Structure formats: structure tokens, C-alpha cells
Image (tube, rainbow, N blue to C red):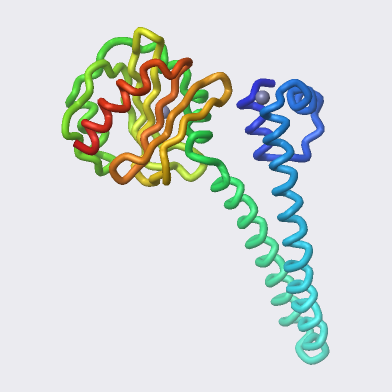
């Protein structure tokens, strides 16, 4: 199991006890730390649900029992539907929070990992295709940087962020550029994840994310996209 597989499993079930899951946690300090954070979050959720949910459900059942003496059939059916609805709402709430808890940088790395084959592309893409792809995301480019070998209007992350995914081959290896048009991070940050170096920064109305094995070309490529998007 690698880091990406581990994080995917972690998102599904932090309590997982499968041998490969446990083994990766023991061997990888960063994933072990993520696991500890997930368990703490899980604990908070369980505590929150234990306080709020049974109180509401108990009330609903009590109400149903009282009225049941008068209108037995209808109200029991309604109460069980209410309990089912409450359980559904709570369940959806938990899933929604998990999906949103992932930072954009993590979603970008996971997206790259899921489409690794495009890193091998080297033939240049026409500038008109780059312009058209950004236009689909509501972004008018002021100019198109040279040296783009892949462009696609990919949905990124569980909440399908409106993004443009690009690859730029450099002397230092392929550099992935992901422009998330519908979410703007507060501040620029460099990061390291799953053996990749990364940079995310607010640009225009969205977020520019750079990913590569080394950050050697980040400054040059950042300047290109600043000129292209912000002008
Ligand atoms: Zn790991
Ligand atoms: Zn993509």
C-alpha cells in the first residue's frame, strides 16, 4: 500500500485494521500522523453525535409512543420515517464534512496520481486549445505560456472543483499545473506530499497549484501563469 492508497482508505474508514493498512501506518510517519488526526476528528464526531442525535431520536420516539395511544398506526409510521430521515441527514453530514476537510493541495496531488500517464506527454498543445479550456472555466487568459503538453478541464476532488489541469515538461522533469477556478486559498504555501513538491497560491479568482519532483522551476512557471491569468 502506498501513501495515496492509504489516504484513500483512511478517508473511507479511519478504524480500518487490514494488514497492509496497519503496516503502512507503522512505516510512514506522515501517514501515521494523518491517521492520528483522522481518529481525533472521528472521536469529535462520535461525541457530537452521541450528545445530539439520541436526544432528538428519543424525543421523536417518546412523541410517537404518546400519540400512538390515540392514532396508533399513522404516527408510528411517521416516527420511524422521522428517525430514518434523521439518520440519513446525520450520515450525509459526516460524509460531506470528510470530503470538504481535504485541502486543495491534497485533492490536486490525488488528481495527479489518478492521471499519471499524462506526465509522459511532450508534444506541444496549440495555444488556442489552452485558451478555450480556460474559457470553459470562465477565465480569459491574457497570454498563453509556451511549453504546454497537456490541457484538460478536469473536475478535481470529491466536490468536483472547476479546474484546468496542465502539464509543462521542463529540464527538471514534468511540472503539473492545476488551476482551481472556483476556490481561492487565503495565502501562498509550499508543501511536500507523497514524494512531490508543491506550491499553491491565490491567483485571479482561483488557486494556482504547481506540482513536480523538484521546485527548481516553480518561480519561473509561477511568473508565466501570473502574467497569463492576472496580467
Ligand atoms: Zn504514507
Ligand atoms: Zn486531470
Please say if 211 is above or below 120.
below
Number of numbered discs present?
Answer: 0
Based on the displayed image, in which of its 4 quarters is residue 63 positioned?
bottom right
Residue found at the far bottom of this picture: 70
- Return the x and y of residue 107 as percentages of the image width and height: 50, 35
Residue 31 is left or right of residue 96, and the answer is right
Depth order, front residue of 107/40:
40
Residue 3 is left or right of residue 42, and the answer is left
At x 68% / y 67%, what residue is drawn? 86
Based on the displayed image, in which of its 4 quarters is residue 84 positioned?
bottom right
Based on the displayed image, in which of its 4 quarters is residue 37 positioned?
top right
Depth order, front residue of 68/215:
215
- Quadrant, the N terminus: top right
At x 27% / y 27%, what residue is drawn? 223
- Return the x and y of residue 161 as percentages of the image width and height: 42, 42
Residue 212 is left or right of residue 74, and the answer is left
Residue 222 is left or right of residue 143, and the answer is right
Q: Regarding ligand 2, which quadrant of the image does it lie in? A: top left
At x 62% / y 50%, what residue is drawn? 95
Amino acid at each position: 500500500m502506498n501513501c495515496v492508497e492509504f489516504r484513500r482508505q483512511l478517508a473511507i474508514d479511519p478504524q480500518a485494521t487490514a494488514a497492509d493498512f496497519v503496516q503502512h501506518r507503522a512505516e510512514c510517519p506522515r501517514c501515521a500522523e494523518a491517521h492520528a488526526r483522522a481518529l481525533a476528528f472521528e472521536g469529535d464526531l462520535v461525541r457530537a453525535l452521541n450528545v445530539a442525535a439520541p436526544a432528538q431520536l428519543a424525543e421523536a420516539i417518546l412523541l410517537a409512543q404518546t400519540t400512538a395511544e390515540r392514532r396508533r398506526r399513522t404516527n408510528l409510521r411517521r416516527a420511524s420515517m422521522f428517525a430514518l430521515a434523521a439518520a440519513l441527514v446525520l450520515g450525509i453530514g459526516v460524509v460531506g464534512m470528510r470530503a470538504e476537510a481535504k485541502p486543495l493541495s491534497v485533492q490536486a496531488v490525488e488528481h495527479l496520481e489518478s492521471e499519471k500517464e499524462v506526465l509522459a506527454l511532450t508534444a506541444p498543445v496549440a495555444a488556442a486549445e489552452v485558451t478555450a479550456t480556460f474559457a470553459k472555466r470562465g477565465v480569459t487568459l491574457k497570454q498563453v505560456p509556451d511549453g504546454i503538453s497537456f490541457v484538460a478541464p478536469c473536475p478535481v476532488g470529491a466536490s468536483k472543483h472547476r479546474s484546468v489541469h496542465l502539464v509543462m515538461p521542463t529540464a527538471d522533469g514534468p511540472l503539473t499545473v492545476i488551476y482551481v477556478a472556483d476556490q481561492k486559498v487565503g495565502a501562498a504555501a509550499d508543501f511536500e506530499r507523497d514524494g512531490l513538491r508543491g506550491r499553491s497560491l491565490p491567483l485571479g479568482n482561483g488557486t494556482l497549484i504547481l506540482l513536480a519532483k523538484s521546485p527548481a522551476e516553480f518561480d519561473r512557471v509561477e511568473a508565466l501563469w501570473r502574467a497569463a491569468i492576472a496580467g
